[in-house]
Amino acid sequence: MRDLGPSPVSPPVSPPVSPPSAASPVSRSLSRAQSPRPEPPAGSGHGHGARPGRAGSGTGKSQQRRGRRGRAGTGRAPGGLGCPRCHIGVARSGVPAVPKRGASCPEAGCQLSGTGMDAPTPLPTLIRKKRDGERLEDAEIRSFVRGVTEGTVQQGQIGAMLMAIRLRGMDAGETLALTQAMASSGRTMAWPPAWHGLVVDKHSTGGVGDKVSLALAPALAACGCKVPMISGRGLGHTGGTLDKLEAIPGFRVSQSPEEMRHILERVGCCIVGQSAELVPADRVLYGLRDVTATVDSLPLITASILSKKAAERLSALVLDVKFGGAALYPTQESARELAQSLVEVGTQLGIRTAALLTRMEQPLGRAVGNALEVLEALQCLGGSGPSDLRHLVTVLGGVLLWQCGMEQGPEQGRERLARALDDGSALGKFEAMLGAQGVPPETARELCAGTPARRRQLLGQAEVCEELPVLQEGWVQQVRALPLARVLHHLGAGRARAGDPVNLRVGAELLVGTGQHLRAGQPWLRLHHEGTLSAQARRELQDALCLAPEPPRDLPPLVAETILPSGSVRDSQ
């Protein structure tokens, strides 16, 4: 195994950033967007293509009855439905106030604030403006996102705007406005005041064998954090956290915001899929980015990631931005550009944000494939498992514990998280999370406390398990992640497009590590699959094993840099 070295972050004298003060423009603009917002009243037209402020906006008798009853838990006056977006208004004679044609909402943070609610800028004008390299105003960006959310714009127009953004880019202010508008396109989470400063999350740009979330979320919960982790599914050669968890019988990734809060109260962490109620604009834009070749747009990636985190109302966020042959970004420089964008916008949103640049040339850990990665995550939660996986889990968690003020520095945070892995408290939280998300108690208990053989039996095994031999003697320089992941993808472990089924039992176990000397004929890979492995697939797998006559020298650290909100970059040691 490679020498990972000490933590890449040196403890600073003071926390990296403070959230914007109550008087700051960013804080004011988000105050409304980050408060729980009721669903729009029937007849308002929101979400059905109607334009706010026109006929059908809610002046009938049924709407008056709803107005007199008020809306529970919103703190609004009964009948206060003046703005169809945030429902601010003044009731007169029991009749909800309806905005006049072309009026604006006075509430800071509402998407209709200052826009002229009945007079949005025509989308072709906005597309032309961005196409020509001009800057979009905040109100224009809100208008675009509102049309996307309400379904009043054509897919071709959305695609044209995405391509204009991809080609012309957005400055930091535009990216922030897009993120805010997307975050407020749906519901946002609401947490008890006692959780202030403790709500944290982590996001990874995706890799091969990346099962960090499965160990990190319960370990953070064991340290006293609240972790409402919203994760995704695998696509292409990269795996997805939700697919891994669904290898566990009974695990339910679909949880409402109310269920999430209940699980956090009981356990301290949950790992769920994106609810249809949270950031609906991102669902539309994310689906179209793939078919319009705009997946790699920096502002679109930034807004997609951070809009969901803003809707979670996080206190702190750490980002694992991967680079290398099996990552979205091939070079450290390109990954750094994304990381700096994410840290800058996240900080402006009032979230204490930091990013780690990590290498993705080789698989993380020794297991690749959904069920096999759950088994390896359980090893990490039990204080063992591959050293590179444990290193990344503790470094990411240490930064989060530092950011939310629970430890004086990232190194102290790393040590505290390691103790949670070693003393069994993290594994206990994982078992509790499984039970809270639908896994039968006996299954959760046996999975966490059972033997390796019993764990494999519970998760299921592929029909075929075979080992590949080393073809020639040599020293392992690396095992390339991309060809390995591609073969597994073709064997059914991954999906080519959203919605495709995956075989959760297909995967591979690395039996060797970097710097190890191998003899010809020695097994180096254990493959789990459901059928015959083609000769071409065997050749591709053998090409993934890189050998040389001499042992490797100067192995680079797993974590290359840590980027902080101040813009400083800390090199890994």
Image (tube, rainbow, N blue to C red):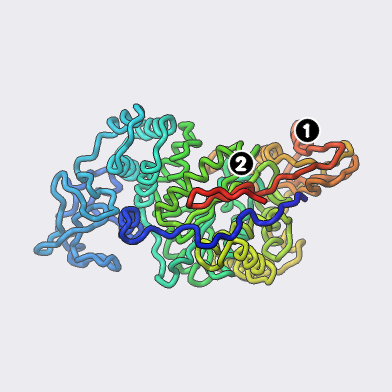
Quickly name the residue at label 2.
323
The kind of residue on which mark 1 rests is Arg
Compared with 316, 490 (above or below) is above
Judge the density around disc 2: few (<14), some (14-19), many (≥20) Cα neighbours within 10 Å.
Answer: many
Identify which residue is drawn at 71% across, 47% down: 507
Residue furthest top in the image = 132
Give SS at disc 2.
strand
Distance CA(mark 2)–CA(mark 1): 25 Å
Does any portion of residue 427 appear in the rendered image?
no
Question: Quadrant of the rendered structure where residue 51 is?
Answer: top left
Identify which residue is drawn at 68% across, 41% down: 361
Residue furthest left in the image = 93
Does any portion of residue 554 appear in the rendered image?
yes
Q: Where's residue 287, x and y in %?
A: 45, 40
Q: Where's residue 35, x and y in %?
A: 34, 61
Q: Where's residue 107, x and y in %?
A: 24, 55
Compared with 2, 134 (above or below) is above
Quickly name the residue at label 1.
539
Q: Nearer the viewer, mark 2 or mark 1?
A: 2
From the viewer's side, name the closer residue of 533 and 303. 303
From the viewer's side, name the closer residue of 10 and 545. 10
Question: Quadrant of the rendered structure where residue 256 is?
Answer: bottom left
Q: Is residue 127 left or right of residue 474?
A: left
Compared with 290, 30 (above or below) is below
Q: Which mark is residue 464?
A: none
Give SS at disc 1.
helix
The kind of residue on which mark 2 rests is Phe
From the viewer's side, name the closer residue of 538 and 137. 137
